Image: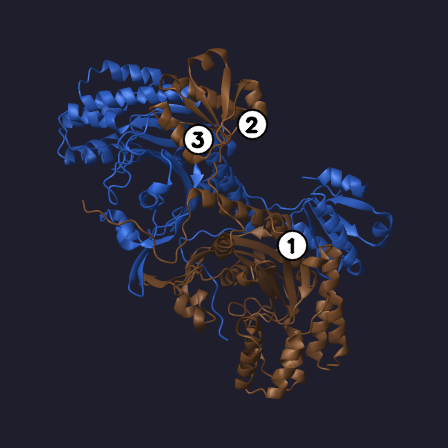
Chain colours: A brown, B blue
Amino acid sequence: MSIVKPSTLPGFMELLPEDQILFNEMKNVIRENFEKHGFLPIDTPVIEKSEVLLAKGGGETEKQIYRFEKGSTDMSLRFDLTVPLARYTVEHFNDLSFPFKRYQIGKVYRGEKAQKGRFREFYQCDIDTIGNGDLSLVNDAEFPVVIYHTFKDLGFTDFTIHLNNRKILKGFFVSLGIEDSTDALRAVDKLDKIGEDAVIEELVETGISVDAAKKIIEFIKIDGSVDEILDSLNNLGVEDDIFKTGLSDITEVIGYIRDFGIDENCFDINLKIARGLDYYTGTVYETTLDNYPDIGSVCSGGRYDNLASNYTDMILPGVGISIGLSRLFYQLNEVKIIESEKKSLIDLLILPMDECISEGIKLVSELRENKVRVGLYTEFAKLKKKFKYANQTKVEYVIVLGEDEIKNRFYSLKNMKTGEQIDISFDELVEKFER
Amino acid sequence: MSIVKPSTLPGFMELLPEDQILFNEMKNVIRENFEKHGFLPIDTPVIEKSEVLLAKGGGETEKQIYRFEKGSTDMSLRFDLTVPLARYTVEHFNDLSFPFKRYQIGKVYRGEKAQKGRFREFYQCDIDTIGNGDLSLVNDAEFPVVIYHTFKDLGFTDFTIHLNNRKILKGFFVSLGIEDSTDALRAVDKLDKIGEDAVIEELVETGISVDAAKKIIEFIKIDGSVDEILDSLNNLGVEDDIFKTGLSDITEVIGYIRDFGIDENCFDINLKIARGLDYYTGTVYETTLDNYPDIGSVCSGGRYDNLASNYTDMILPGVGISIGLSRLFYQLNEVKIIESEKKSLIDLLILPMDECISEGIKLVSELRENKVRVGLYTEFAKLKKKFKYANQTKVEYVIVLGEDEIKNRFYSLKNMKTGEQIDISFDELVEKFER
């Protein structure tokens, strides 16, 4: 038989068990927080009908999609969890209660150009709240609260949730005589990446006067505490109605966020945030790690007026955020915020002498009955090899089981890190390791 | 904009949230048990290089595979978790410790003919233990133990783990002069499905004499307790070495299973079990629910001599089992062993009067700080609509929050099932609902 070199496709993340344990821990913390805040799980198929998935059509995304035929069926792998949510909400509309709060954690696929830190298969962790006809601004305030608790529980202390409202930007543009602000919003969104001059240039290219472009830059640079920014915006004297709605909305949302009582240092208003995606229509969010600005936003989202216009005439407004977990995990590893050290899922390993394997099994079973996370070395081998395995797996404690130990039911417990050994009874073992 | 009818592809399972909660609970119980027994998580990509995934080539499977090209790359969706495990083990060989115990829970893809209870995307929950060069029979005994605890924790009381050893069958065939037993084993495996006569017919078709075929049927029908079957096999006087090894192996494995101390009623020896797959070489397992024999095996697997001969010259023997969770969930639903009733992930829902929304937010936050799983109705609406939502979501308890409640910090807690209402303080609420 000829041998094929085993390898994965470029751009597909695959972890060693010690990294996978860490990754799964993060995934569990996120899931726990989503559920605690009342979001319900769904799990849509990875493959969808192309005509459904691509109903919106066009754009950058379409080129990146894994699309293929099987028999006469044209199918595609999902490239995000939002389009499937729209399809799901309409398809199961009559069985859902609104506001419909759902979470989904799953892999999505984009055939992007392979580059460092960009993956073609990656986890998204999404929550969205969908209203039937309308949806109050209380929901816009709940998302920063979920982000706050999630990132706290993930172990982060210094992060900032940036809020803005697209209506404020849009209304300000209108007040400058700019009616179609889509391209302008896209340009503004790049400020941190390409700098002021380049943004002005891009704005001018869309037909905006240099004077107006400069006013835009000045506007989005308005800085200060949340209340100072709200004051500045109120004092600008912009008379446009969209602007006024945006300002009133963000003021109301800030009020609710304060009612929720999260740390005032963890959020701000940042007028630079536009979110490139054109489906956002109100509140927008980005989240950055204070000490690692280069990582960019680790959790983003916003409010949209109508989730599912491709599938229904019903109006379904929503708010949602997404954590790109694979990318986040990769980046945290890169900057060494997390360092996976090999660690064992068990607390104790029994190394039986070859002739004591049956007694080893019995001991392990008794310990497991007493809620001890214990493993057994199952192979017949020299003691040296058994210890080598214990070392490799990084289990913290080891017991060598020989005839004396079996007879006396007294064990020598070895700490593999310190080398320290103590004599210990079965009951003491249980007391020490019971989970 | 034209509207596309939202629907999923046929053969792709998608659940409502209430079913998904139940499904996820089962998945969590399985994961917990895998981890408790020392299996480490891995998460291989859904897409692999076709040349790697299909290195073994040929057969039924190849036709079912979702295979496509993107750019010049020929790729396929995984159809099981075993081939990716083989690829993973060889690719990361130097970073793994052996015996390598891994679990993986993930979706796999087979473009089978769509039919009731058969899915094209389904979850497999796999554990395997891989040895480097050799692997003791203690491992063969550990799998029934994991199955036992997993199914107990899933809430099953009456199930049987059937054991056999392919060497016993193979050796018996050799003793009858049948050297290549692959086809014969496949025929034997169908006994429960197609009946004795049809199996005899199939055996004869493979070139076996009617006399020998009858002997085979007689042999695989040997019945009784575990010890009675072992006695019968010992007393048969079969002199073939493969047979003897198989008998000695299963005897040793049974001994270890007893050392592990699982309920003697939960396992047996069943000589009818051959497992159609030709890569099994020793112990084989099937698990059936005693009261639902029609469901067939809910957890199967076995021992194989060499996991990864397509990718390496190294000999990597292993043992593994798989639970087909999507199919199991579907079947349990069909026979009404599980019935998903809509239930809420939260224990309590606050329905604030419209003017009390801010105070509602504060109450919810305080309760969440005290580990209460509580939700908030966020919309401005008539009280009737708010109660309708509470009813739909099946939350068990509700509090209507008005000005009196806010002033007195005393609440009227309504049980939505019984209609009973009690007055309760904040502290009592926490005491009642703290998780």
The vertical placement of B275 against B326, above or below, is: above
Residue assigned mark 2: A433
Q: Residue at x 29, y 36 (%)?
A: B316
Q: CA distance from mark 3 to mark 2?
A: 20 Å
Q: Residues within 10 Å of mark 2 (few under 14, many from 20)?
A: some
The C terminus of chain A lies in quadrant: top right
Instruction: Residue A242: give x, y in percent of width and height.
Output: 68, 77
Name the side, left or right, on which A309 lies relative to A114.
right
Give the CA separation, mark 1 to mark 2. Answer: 33 Å
Tell me: residue B79, above or below residue A81. Answer: above
CA separation, marks 3 and 1?
Answer: 38 Å
Residue that badge 3 annotates: B146
Work out whether residue A93 or residue B366 is closer to the camera in this orientation and state it.
B366
Q: Chain of mark 3?
A: B
Q: Chain of mark 1?
A: A
The image position of residue A382, as x and y in percent, is: 34, 23
